[in-house]
Amino acid sequence: MTWLLDTNVWIQYLKGRDAVLGARIDCTDATDLCVCSVVKAELLRGALGYAKSMERTKRIHETLDPYDSLPFDDVAAEYYARIRHTLELQGQVIGPNDLLIAAICLANGCTLVTSNTDEFSRVPGLKCGDWSQP
């Protein structure tokens, strides 16, 4: 199974604030974990808000380099359109970047690891879990 780690998961991992989450990531084979271009963009944008942004940016790159990075491509675009349409009809739209992340997960058959399960659980067919919960 391939696990795509959401932005909030990487933030907790990078800050070392969640021992359970950190252990789970460290014990999982790197080939079973991935990131996506949207998550990278969010992390890199976040780094720019700090005084030592170059150091934070370097740490993000070093941390994420061992993992495959999935792009938002044409297949994900098809999923995005269907997800957004369905959620709009239900009056349950989620954030724009979360829509992109969900579409990438579905397009690549990944399970999303996030602490934002309330929002992502609205996406039909998306498998997700919270690794900070024992």
Image (cartoon, helix red, strand yellow):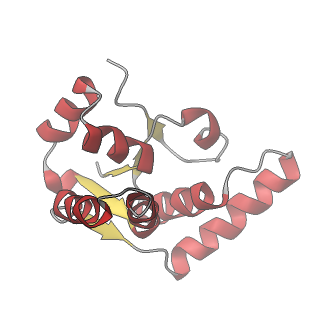
Residue 116, image quadrant: top right
Question: As displayed, is residue 73 above or below residue 16?
Answer: below
Which residue is nearer to you in this view: 91 or 39? Answer: 39
- Residue drawn 58% across and 54% down? 98
User: Looking at the picture, how far across and down is residue 19, in whole percent?
Assistant: 22, 25
Classify residue 63 as left or right of residue 10.
left
Classify residue 101 as left or right of residue 129.
right
User: Looking at the picture, how far across and down is residue 75, in whole percent?
Assistant: 53, 76
Give the residue furthest to the front. Answer: 51
Q: How many marks?
A: 0
- Residue drawn 18% across and 66% down? 65
Which residue is nearer to you in this view: 61 or 118? Answer: 61
Which residue is nearer to you in this view: 109 or 93? Answer: 93
User: Looking at the picture, how far across and down is residue 109, in whole percent?
Assistant: 42, 58
User: Looking at the picture, how far across and down is residue 72, in whole percent?
Assistant: 49, 74
Classify residue 84 as left or right of residue 111.
right
- Residue drawn 43% across and 60% down? 39
Q: Quadrant of the C terminus?
A: top left
Give the residue furthest to the bottom. Answer: 74
- Residue drawn 67% across and 41% down? 122
Classify residue 17 as left or right of residue 59.
right
